[in-house]
Image (tube, rainbow, N blue to C red):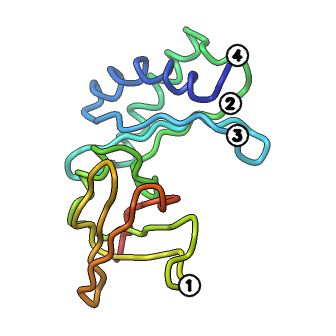
């Protein structure tokens, strides 16, 4: 079974469990890492996700997945906050508006593939950031390999 179809199959199972725990289901990924299959479920909530929140989703989700057995081979279940997750869909970008992001490009622009700045614009074709020096940079979606929020402490 394809990786995306497993994530799509798990999403409606995880959604009510996350909601019952007072969280929002943000994304489900199924991928191979270091020879092991990982089912990663990302949750979010106002005020931030705690370890207890992850546990309150992980335990009932694990039990439900054991009952339904939608994944036929061995895997590890991880329930996580958004943390270092890449922004993927319009909703992710809307929520990140005004936040500091890292933009990684497929090909270098002015000998640089990595840019950092405050996300100031996004649509289906492009996005723009404002750097610390107040320079505004715009990139087309085709140029972008990955965008993720940066957390500074």
Q: Which residue is mark 4?
A: 72
The quarter of the rendered structure image containing the N terminus is top right
Q: Nearer the viewer, mark 3 or mark 1?
A: 1
User: What residue sits 48% from the left and 39% below the top?
Assistant: 79
Left or right of 9 in this view: 18: left
Separation of disc 3 and disc 1 at Cα? 32 Å
Left or right of 72 in this view: 138: left
Q: Nearer the viewer, mark 3 or mark 2?
A: 3
Mark 1 or mark 4: name the one nearer the start of the chain.
4
Q: Which residue is mark 2?
A: 75
Q: Which residue is mark 3?
A: 32
Mark 3 or mark 2: name the one nearer the start of the chain.
3
Mark 1 or mark 2: name the one nearer the start of the chain.
2
Q: Are marks 3 and 2 in contact (CB under 8 Å)?
A: no
Q: Secondary structure at mark 4?
A: loop
Compared to residue 64, the image places residue 56 above or below, namely: below
Q: Are marks 4 and 2 in contact (CB under 8 Å)?
A: no
Residue 57, quarter of picture: top left
Separation of disc 1 and disc 2 at Cα? 40 Å
x and y, in percent, of residue 65 in the image: 54, 17
Mark 3 or mark 1: name the one nearer the start of the chain.
3
Crowd around label 4: few <14 · some 14–19 · many ≥20 (10 Å): few
């Amino acid at each position: 079974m394809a990786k995306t179809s497993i994530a799509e199959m798990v999403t409606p199972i995880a959604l009510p469990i996350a909601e019952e725990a007072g969280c929002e289901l943000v994304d489900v990924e199924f991928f191979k890492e270091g020879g092991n299959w990982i089912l990663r479920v990302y949750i979010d909530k106002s005020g931030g996700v705690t370890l207890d929140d992850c546990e309150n989703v992980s335990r009932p989700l694990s039990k439900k997945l054991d009952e339904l057995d939608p994944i036929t081979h061995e895997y590890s279940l991880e329930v996580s906050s958004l943390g270092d997750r890449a922004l993927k869909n319009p909703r992710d970008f809307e929520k990140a508006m005004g936040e500091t992001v890292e933009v990684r490009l497929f090909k270098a622009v002015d000998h640089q593939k990595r840019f950092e700045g405050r996300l100031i614009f996004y649509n289906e074709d492009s996005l723009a950031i404002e750097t610390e020096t107040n320079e505004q940079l715009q990139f087309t979606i085709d140029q972008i390999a990955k965008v993720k929020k940066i957390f500074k402490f």
